[in-house]
Amino acid sequence: MGALDAALGTVSKQLIDQFGTPLVLRQVDDGEYDTTTGRKERIRRDRIVKGVFEPYRARFAKGRPPSGTRASEFQITIAAQQGSDPDLFRAPAETDQVVLGAWVNYGTDELPDVRGGEVHEIVHVDPIRSGDDVALYVLHVRR
């Protein structure tokens, strides 16, 4: 861990919290193998995070847009630090989704109840480092 890692991660989170827009990060993981159905069930975890939206930039594609790039694609920058318990949040992956404009019910559970909204697929995740640690994640998102 570098000397500035903790400080830069904290500052990144504060700036995203101040200037970002709330969104739902839907993390999808493989669950247990079901011997009855012969399939792995998918586990979905919805997290409310804040992100900064920008038009898509081709830097994810090594200087040129990949084939099939759509004009409606955009990128979202989120902080790597999300809350006091790091076990509740894992790094975003290309199997995850972003839900925009959803109705969110904060129940008694640790996870919110998310309904409706537009589901966008995460095409690529670009970690931005501050020394040894990741401070931000830039998500390339498409509908």
Image (tube, rainbow, N blue to C red):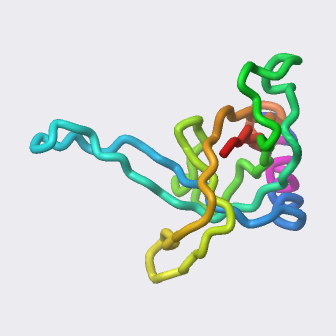
Image point (82%, 22%), residue name: 65
Image point (52%, 50%), residue name: 27
Identify the main secondary structure in magenta. helix
Q: Quadrant of residue 44?
A: bottom left
Q: Position of residue 32 (x, y in %)?
A: 26, 44
Magenta part of the protein: which range?
Answer: 5-12
Q: Nearer the viewer, residue 16 or 87?
A: 16
Q: Position of residue 43 (x, y in %)?
A: 38, 51
Image point (87%, 47%), residue name: 54
* Residue 141 left/right relative to 128: left
Q: Nearer the viewer, residue 19 or 36?
A: 36
- Residue 105 within the segment the image draws in magenta: no
Q: Quadrant of the N terminus?
A: top right
Image point (29%, 46%), residue name: 41
- Residue 7 within the segment the image draws in magenta: yes
Q: Nearer the viewer, residue 10 or 61?
A: 61
Q: Quadrant of residue 31?
A: top left
Q: Relative to 33, does residue 108 appear above or below in the rendering?
A: below
Residue 64 in view here: yes
Q: Relative to 113, does residue 44 appear above or below in the rendering?
A: above
Residue at the left extreme of this rendering = 36
Residue 135 in view here: no
